[in-house]
Image (cartoon, grey):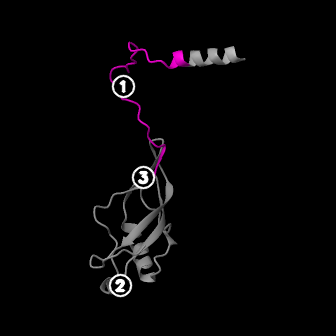
Amino acid sequence: MHRVTVLAVALLVLACQKDQGAIIKLPEGTPPPVDQPRDLPPVALNAQTPVEYPPALFDQGIEGTVILRLYADTAGALVNDSTRVQESSGFPALDSAAVAAAPNLRFAPARHDGKPVAASFLQPIYFRHPGVGGTTP
């Protein structure tokens, strides 16, 4: 048994040794393999946010985050009436502002194996006041 183990280890060491002359080249014009995820979520395209901070809450320095559940089709367009508040900010006015802005949000479609697909996803909407020192989750 000991001889078999020593032989197996010796073969393993020989197999793992690097041959300095053995270089594997890819054919010309072949891009190097890249590990890409199979699934990619929709990507926001708006250069500026269409979300309007409720003036009364802005004046009071109230901040919060609303998590929306959205559904985008294969072109990235949001499906009408699919917007839901997944997680409330705790302030109904912030939640309403996020939902009201959803139809104006633009997305590149989700992808599966490089092809556009319809997908449900979560989108955080952050309400942060520039004059407030801290942040409110």
Evaluate if marks 2 and 1 touch, with contact meaning CB atoms under 8 Å apart. Answer: no
In this orientation, which residue lies closer to the viewer: 58 or 115? 58
Stretch in magenta = 13-41
How many neighbours does mark 2 have within 10 angstroms: few (below 14), some (14-19), or many (20 or more)?
some
Q: Position of residue 41 (x, y in %)?
A: 45, 53
Q: Amino acid at mark 2?
A: Leu
Q: Amino acid at mark 1?
A: Thr
Give the residue number, with chain letter if any, for mark 3. 109
Place residue 124 in its image quadrant: bottom left
Q: Is residue 107 above or below residue 14?
A: below
How many neighbours does mark 3 have within 10 angstroms: few (below 14), some (14-19), or many (20 or more)?
many
Q: Residue at x 44, y 62 (%)?
A: 78
Q: Amino acid at mark 3?
A: Pro
Q: Position of residue 104 (x, y in %)?
A: 36, 67
Q: Is residue 39 magenta?
A: yes
**Direction front: furthest residue:** 2
Whole-number angstrom distance, CA of label 2 to CA of label 1: 56 Å
**Element type at mark 2:** helix
